[in-house]
Amino acid sequence: MLKKIIILPFEDFFSGLDSALTTVSAVNIGAIFVLFALTWWIYVPIHELAHALGCIMGGGTVSRLEISPLYGGGILERIFPFVYSGSDYAGQLTGFDTMGSDVTYMLTVFLPFLLTIFLGVPLLRSAAGSAPLAASVKLGIALPIAFAPFISFSGDYYEMGSIVVSRIAGAISAAPDSAAWRSDDVFKLGKELFFSGKPYSAADILGVASSFVLGVAFIYVTYLLGVLWSNVLGIGRKNGPAS
């Protein structure tokens, strides 16, 4: 059962790819790559703005959202007062206040992935069994959105895991500095915690590792929610491509 869950997203992808490549042509292959790039370019700023919206919806405030000029940061900063063009990442919410609420914090981090559930996964699963060109179009659009949680394993999903783990650790007083485990970049956090010469404890190692594992579990929960929504819509992966 666990193995089936782990490989399900990749089965969905390869099933869609099989349909897209039933008739191998430059048009079909080009459609996948061009639409993937275009969708990614559009999705990134929407994703970042959704983080800000999640914070505001949860009762928090947003003061600074950095978006790379490559993804329209220069344009968006003219529209939204909290957007600033330029970031070390594609985009990053660097100034926000959850008013001490972890529920608001979780909503801030998770809200963009509603697109994965309600759009990305159903579109990906609908590619299987479609005509080759239609499958190519669906794949190109769906891939960045459906697989956004997997791309965010070290960022948003680690952060969600760390919110829960640090909250539990703080509640049982197992680690007084558990808030230090919270980060939107687990690699940067690991470098600062474990390779900067500062003292750290076994609790820190366990806390970061547990946060990472829980984050991966959340990735699959998100994808499975997308599968459930697909079933509600009557969209399921078909066995063979249409002619």
Image (cartoon, rainbow, N blue to C red):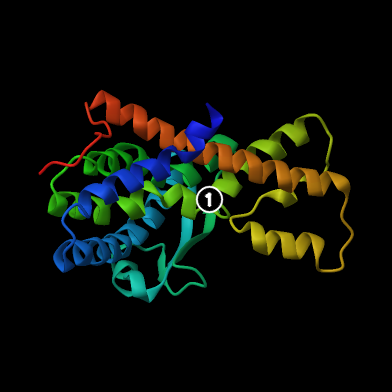
Q: Is residue 27 shown left or right of residue 116?
A: left
Whether residue 100 is situated above or below residue 142 in the rendered picture: above
Q: Is residue 42 visible?
A: yes
Residue 134, image x and y in percent? 14, 50
Residue 236 in the image: x percent, y percent? Answer: 26, 31
Q: Nearer the viewer, residue 166 or 139?
A: 139
Return the residue at label 1.
Answer: 156
Q: Amino acid at mark 1?
A: Asp
Q: Is residue 196 above or below residue 136?
A: below
Q: Please give left or right for residue 149 compared with residue 169 in the image.
A: left
Q: Nearer the viewer, residue 192 or 2?
A: 2
Dot 1: element? helix
Residue at image position (32%, 61%) is: 40
Q: Residue 83 is drawn in which quadrant?
A: bottom left
Residue at x 31% of width, y 67% of height: 76
Query: In the rendered view, does 90 fall on the left or right side of 18?
Result: right
Residue 174 point in image, percent of width and height: 84, 35
- Image coordinates of residue 206 in percent, x first then y, are 79, 43
Q: Residue at x 35, y 75 (%)?
A: 70
